Amino acid sequence: MKILLAAVIALIVSAVAGKLLIPALVKMKVGQSIKEIGPTWHMNKQGTPTMGGLMFIIGIGVAILIMGWEGMLQGNFTHLYVFAFALVFGLIGYIDDYQKIKHKQNTGLTAPQKFLLQLAAAILFVCLMRYEGHVSPNLYVPFADTYLVMNWIVYMIFAAFVIVGTVNAVNITDGLDGLSSSVTIPVAVFFAVLGGYWGQYEQLGIFGGAMVGGLIGFLLYNHYPAKVFMGDTGSLFLGGAVAALAFAYDMPLVLILVGIVYICETLSDILQVGYFKLTHGKRIFKMAPLHHHFEMCGWNEKKIVAVFSTISAIFCVLAFLGVMNRFAI
């Protein structure tokens, strides 16, 4: 019940925040700049308010404080650790968005700046979770119901790579109206259901439920045609939240399943760039990342969002089937 109520509270707060935030963003002329190398028909999105991710960040924050209060009184702060970690990434995204708006172009922080900030945040988070006893170097393998034992140094390198990769993969997925939020809702549902299914993870379930509600509230304004974009503020926060939840549940390998869309989007970008350089101008996809390829194939944004979200939901169901017996070993 707490998880469901967290979703309802986050939805209401996010929806109300949108009513207040969007006019304020418009007044401040906080508009999105569109890359010239992107699809030409995306140019009509130029000027759409960005940094809308603030609305679901606020919604999630309010919901987890209210519904997680009882657990906090008992000394369980895992959901706050996840929120704080995601918030750090949201702050990095906010700085990036601010730089883009200030210079009126689609480039903010440099790639090395983003990477170093994200890497530092990832290492600090894993160290904190290790200190609190929430993570171990024993990687749980879905479906196999077994563990891969690693030493801590290797695990830390692995964790930093996975976290930074996940965050940036979610960011890459945020390229169409409602895409990143719609794809992430099934992922949040997965983590929320696990929290209810495994009682000892209720605080994390509350966070997952709040994510579901917050994203639905945001989608009221972000569905096609979008009235607001989440910006890097929102997409980096979401990426941080997804990665943090996977590690807080101490099963980062589950990201391979729940993050299948993020992975495909990122791989399409990597393959495109690599193949382009190797062949001196040839391309695998009509345009990368993957959602742009399907646009160039004639799919409209609504169809792409529907298909990608369905794929995400199917793999989240598979992920649940793969981990549901974890504590029955």
Image: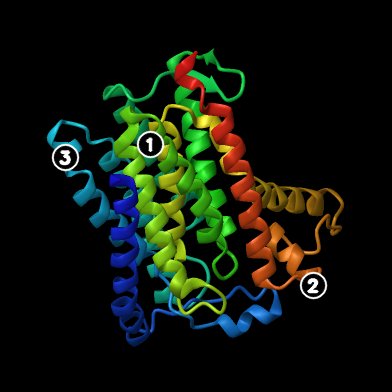
**Which residue is at a point 56% across and 55% down the rendered structure image?**
183
Q: CA distance from mark 3 to mark 2?
A: 51 Å
Residue 244 rendering spot, x and y as whole percentages: 40, 39
Hey, what amino acid is under mark 1?
A: Gly
State left or right for residue 117 relative to residue 294.
left
Hey, what amino acid is under mark 3?
A: Glu
Q: Closer to the N terminus: mark 1 or mark 3?
A: 3
Report the residue marked by disc 2.
298
Q: Closer to the N terminus: mark 3 or mark 2?
A: 3
> Could one spot residue 166 in this view of the protein?
yes
Report the residue that reaches farthest toward the left.
73
Disc 3, SS: helix
State left or right for residue 86 relative to residue 73.
right
> Circles 3 and 2: CB distance less than 8 Å?
no
> Could one spot residue 109 in this view of the protein?
no
Residue 308 rendering spot, x and y as whole percentages: 65, 56
Mark 2 closeness class: few <14, some 14–19, many ≥20 residues within 10 Å? few
| The label number, if any, that marks residue 257 in the structure image | none
Say if 8 sits above or below 252 in the image. Answer: below
**Which residue is at a point 63% across and 45% down the rendered structure image?**
314
Disc 1, SS: helix
Report the residue marked by disc 3.
70
